[in-house]
Image: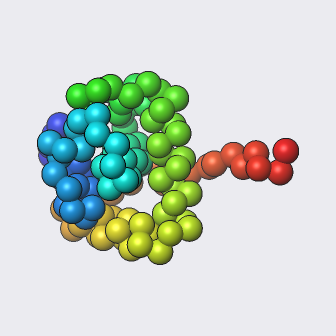
Amino acid sequence: MTKQQKIKLIKDTCCKAMGVKWKDVNTAKRTDALVKTRHLIMFFLWRYTRLGLKEIGMEFAHPFKTSSVIYCRNTCYQLMNKSGKLFAIDLVIKAELQERGIYPTRLFFKIVDNSHE
């Protein structure tokens, strides 16, 4: 599977799991479902590919800066650990990607918690 095929599969899988279309996600609209889908796509692109943060941001029609990709990735990770619905969607996406032979390239995720300061 080529890198571009893997990227497209991750985008399509995340959109399907969230019940939205890529053409809607790839706009500047900021509805809750579209924002969460973008977060998921960035998280899974980071976790399941070797793309750099800048490359992930460039996958969208309105490119995201590196700092925005980091924010989206961290927010998504935190939401998946707190929200039951997003956790369930995460499991569905992981299962579908694994079924198609795509496995994480980054196994660990370290988030810095500065809430105690």
Q: How many marks can you see? A: 0
- Image coordinates of residue 60 in percent, x first then y, are 26, 32
Residue at image coords 51%, 37%: 70
Q: Up-down: is 70 above or below 15?
A: above
Residue at image coords 16%, 51%: 21
Taking 12 as reference, is 83 left or right? right
Residue at image coords 72%, 49%: 113
The answer to whether residue 59 is visible is no
The answer to whether residue 69 is visible is yes
Taking 110 as reference, is 20 left or right? left
Taking 117 as reference, is 112 left or right? left
Q: How is the image coloured?
A: rainbow
Q: Up-down: is 115 above or below 62?
A: below
Viewer-proximal residue among 85 and 9 = 85
- Image coordinates of residue 23 in percent, x first then y, are 14, 42
Q: Quadrant of residue 51?
A: top left
- Image coordinates of residue 95 in percent, x first then y, are 29, 70
Viewer-proximal residue among 7 and 63 = 63
- Image coordinates of residue 58 in percent, x first then y, are 30, 26
Taking 6 as reference, is 46 left or right? right
Residue at image coords 51%, 55%: 77
Q: Up-down: is 18 above or below 74?
A: below
